[in-house]
Image (spheres, rainbow, N blue to C red):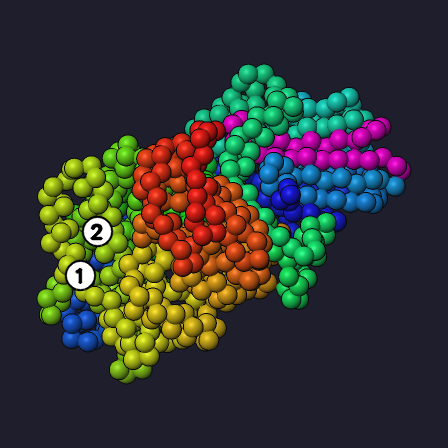
């Protein structure tokens, strides 16, 4: 069954439009009959320019803050941090503009169909005009050719008169050519929104300070005439029209100041659209399909339904789902949509997926549409490895490499530490300092450490030792050096962190005051143990960094243990404070359960208590929070609770176009939901391959092909009536793996390139043929 989103009317707003992307160029396509609209983005279009964000006052207050915390003066310590140790808000991701195509004096239409085929990455519209003319449209954004391609075609006769315009919310000039448009503009030098406040300050455009950009549009017609007019192109009498668009900015890297006279954006655009002569629709489409399908087709998921709803429009299916109808095919569509969205928003050569992936129509977007690295950016990439999209992590790793350089100065000047650090947010300019605002989010120097674990995960899934040596370890070792220097010795002789906060959460001190700052929050301890352990193992594998190995071996046993509280819950802070918000949306203190694997049986049981208490008080009310809870329950192998949270994500936090509704739109819920589904079907932590570890009753029968497991294993699963029928495992190298399903457990020696088939009781045989 081909996964697709289907609608019987055009999008009425952005939340109904459908996303296209190639990792750098993005579009939300509406499919209007009389007025086609494509809201455009280009991944390097951000406000700002390189600045010195260092707070030179911060370090001299650090020791005083630590003394206040040791004396139990949490509120006073937090006040000092907020007065003397914070910085400024990050820069904001910007829209490129809008491509509009107006059908002038066109008859009304019927039999309207609008689809997004996830397998092909192609948007389509079909309808019939009242005069009998059938029209069709197709659109895609090609990664190999760096171009948005849009075709409007009359199946017989000619199209109505069309008028094409290109607009931007930024100061810009539009130049008309015989069959093209050139849009040149400047981005803001600053978008100041105070980050968590409701009323943004003005957008600041200062000549020559913000980035410059160019968008180039070319039109190809079959028959007809193209006439440049004021503000656009008029097309008359054409049987079909192909619109090609590309865009670029003068961003070079995080530390190079933009040149206001830089002509490279236009030169780059012309090289794309004019360099080797006109690009034909057929060639562009064929190359796009080959590229897209090479990634997307690796994984298929079928969750069998008693009666299929696949023929119904997606928005109607979603409404029925919200009303209580079962639709496992919609859940499998949501899984594949997450994979599609990551492919569209994170490809080699582009920027990583931000809070909105690649798609943002606002000059002052919610939370700057930045990289929030205390959960949201990490969640965007939880599913990349397990869902067989390892290549899509390349932009994240490029970001990490940049941060590992930018963050060295922050570590040294702010804290007198080696290595590198990053805090709660970053942006195109690789901000690594604290933001402004409350210490509950702004002061948290553990973001770089958490992000670094994605490098280790990539190695575990791929077993690529060259990647480990040349890309991962330089970043991991710097993160580890900072963590070693950031740790303090507590009076009881254990090591921990001070000051410390649990991202965005607060407790009540002895005087009933809301506080965020204490020592050795549970999440800090988990990141310390996790990142230092990963780094140590990487050094041992590569037989390098002997001094760092010795430091880590000496520190690890001394890190303070995790604690449980009076109700059997995992403690979030170093003491059992009263929570200011019992249903807080974050589950930071369960980092050791997921995404890491640090909790023993006792702490896993405590995690159940913690999760239930949070949910009983309303947690999971944002899309990504529900997705996080689903992943945590899946790791606990609580199949019904995991499904309950996944269902909540879809039923309560999903827009008509199936994008995640925080609210407003935030893409991490989509990626987190896809991760949860993969975790429910396959897990591979703790050196064990768990088959169907959290399969819910609602997915009684189904099959999945192409999921990845740590150890560079590819796994196919087939089940009926809730029971495993068969599993197929393909290893890329010789290895030994422990496979578990229910009460069955088996150790197996796998040979590179040879498939092993297992039955429900894990009885199996080796196939003789080599895998393709």
Q: Mark 2 falls on what kind of element?
A: helix
The boundaries of the magenta stretch are 131-158
Q: Which image quadrant: the N terminus?
A: top right
SS label for mark 1 = loop
Q: Is residue 624 left or right of residue 702?
A: left
The part of the image, by quadrant, that contains residue 572 is: bottom left
Residue at 51% from the left image edge and 37% from the top image edge: 298
Q: Which residue is mark 1?
A: 559
Q: Residues within 10 Å of mark 2 (few under 14, many from 20)?
A: many
Quick check: 625 left or right of 475? right
Give the residue pinned by disc 2: 532
Question: What secondary structure is the stretch in magenta mostly built from?
Answer: strand
Quick check: can you spot residue 149? Answer: yes
Nearer to me, 708 or 230: 708
x, y percentage for residue 640?
A: 50, 65
Marks 2 & 1, CB-CB < 8 Å contact: yes
Percent of width and height locating residue 269: 52, 26
């Amino acid at each position: 069954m081909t996964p697709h989103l289907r609608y019987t009317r055009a999008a009425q707003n952005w939340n109904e439009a459908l996303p296209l992307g190639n990792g750098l160029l993005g579009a939300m396509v509406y499919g209007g009959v009389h007025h086609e609209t494509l809201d455009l983005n280009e991944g390097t279009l951000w406000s700002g320019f390189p600045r010195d964000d260092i707070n030179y006052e911060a370090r001299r207050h650090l020791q005083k803050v630590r003394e206040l915390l040791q004396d139990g003066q949490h509120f006073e310590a937090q006040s000092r941090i907020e007065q003397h140790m914070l910085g400024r808000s990050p820069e904001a991701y910007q829209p490129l503009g809008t491509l509009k195509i107006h059908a002038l004096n066109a008859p009304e239409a019927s039999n309207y169909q609008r689809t997004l085929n996830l397998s092909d990455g192609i948007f389509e519209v079909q309808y019939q005009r009242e005069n009998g003319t059938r029209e069709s449209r197709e659109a895609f954004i090609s990664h190999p050719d760096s171009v948005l391609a849009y075709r409007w075609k009359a199946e017989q006769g000619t199209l109505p008169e069309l008028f094409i315009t290109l607009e931007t919310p930024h100061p810009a000039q539009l130049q008309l050519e015989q069959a093209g448009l050139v849009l040149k503009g400047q981005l803001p030098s600053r978008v100041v929104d105070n980050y968590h406040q409701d009323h943004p300050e003005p957008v600041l455009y200062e000549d020559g300070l913000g980035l410059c950009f160019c968008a180039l549009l070319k039109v190809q017609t079959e028959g007809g005439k193209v006439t440049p007019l004021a503000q656009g192109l008029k097309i008359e009498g054409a049987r079909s029209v192909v619109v090609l668009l590309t865009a670029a900015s003068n961003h070079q890297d995080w530390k190079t100041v933009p040149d206001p006279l830089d002509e490279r954006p236009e030169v780059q655009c012309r090289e794309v659209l004019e360099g080797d002569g006109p690009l034909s629709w057929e060639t562009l489409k064929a190359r796009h399909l080959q590229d897209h399908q090479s990634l997307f087709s690796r994984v298929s998921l079928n969750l069998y339904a008693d009666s299929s709803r696949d023929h119904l429009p997606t928005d109607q299916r979603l409404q029925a789902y919200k009303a209580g109808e079962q639709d496992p095919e919609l859940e499998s569509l949501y899984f594949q949509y997450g994979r599609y969205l990551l492919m569209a928003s994170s490809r080699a050569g582009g920027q990583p997926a931000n809070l909105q992936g690649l798609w943002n129509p606002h000059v002052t977007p919610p939370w700057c549409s930045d990289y929030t690295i205390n959960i949201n950016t990490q969640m965007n990439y939880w599913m990349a490895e397990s869902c067989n999209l390892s290549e899509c992590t390349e932009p994240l790793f490029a970001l990490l490499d940049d941060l590992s350089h930018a963050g060295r100065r922050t570590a040294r000047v702010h804290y007198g530490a080696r290595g590198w650090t990053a805090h709660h947010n970053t942006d195109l300019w690789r901000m690594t300092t604290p933001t402004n605002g409350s210490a509950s989010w702004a002061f948290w120097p553990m973001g770089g450490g958490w992000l670094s674990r994605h490098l280790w995960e990539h190695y575990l899934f791929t077993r690529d030792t060259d990647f480990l040596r040349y890309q991962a370890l330089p970043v991991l070792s710097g993160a580890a050096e900072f963590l070693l220097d950031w740790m303090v010795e507590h009076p009881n002789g254990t090591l921990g962190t001070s000051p410390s906060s649990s991202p965005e959460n607060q407790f009540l001190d002895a005087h009933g005051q809301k506080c965020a700052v204490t020592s050795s929050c549970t999440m800090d301890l988990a990141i310390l143990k996790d990142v230092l352990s990963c780094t140590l193992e990487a050094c041992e594998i590569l037989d390098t960094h002997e001094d760092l190995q010795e430091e880590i071996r000496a520190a690890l046993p001394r890190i303070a243990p995790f604690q449980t509280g009076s109700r059997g819950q995992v403690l979030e802070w170093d003491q059992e404070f009263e929570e200011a918000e019992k249903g807080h949306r974050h589950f930071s203190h369960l980092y050791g359960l997921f995404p890491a694997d640090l909790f023993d049986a006792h702490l896993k049981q405590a995690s159940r208590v913690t999760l239930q208490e949070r949910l009983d008080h309303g947690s999971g009310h944002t899309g990504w929070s529900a997705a996080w809870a689903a992943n945590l329950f899946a790791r606990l192998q609580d199949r019904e609770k995991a499904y309950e949270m996944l269902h909540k994500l879809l039923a309560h936090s999903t827009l008509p176009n199936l994008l995640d509704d925080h609210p407003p739109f935030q893409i991490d819920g989509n990626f987190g939901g896809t991760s949860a589904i993969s975790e429910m079907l396959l897990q591979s932590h703790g050196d064990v391959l768990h088959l169907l570890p959290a399969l819910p009753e609602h997915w009684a029968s189904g099959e999945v092909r192409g999921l990845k497991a740590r150890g560079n294993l590819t796994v196919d699963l087939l089940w009926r009536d809730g029971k495993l029928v068969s599993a197929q495992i393909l290893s890329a190298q010789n290895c030994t793996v422990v496979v578990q399903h229910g009460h069955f457990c088996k150790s197996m020696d796998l040979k590179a390139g040879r498939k092993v088939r297992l039955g429900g009781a894990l009885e199996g045989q080796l196939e003789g043929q080599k895998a393709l």
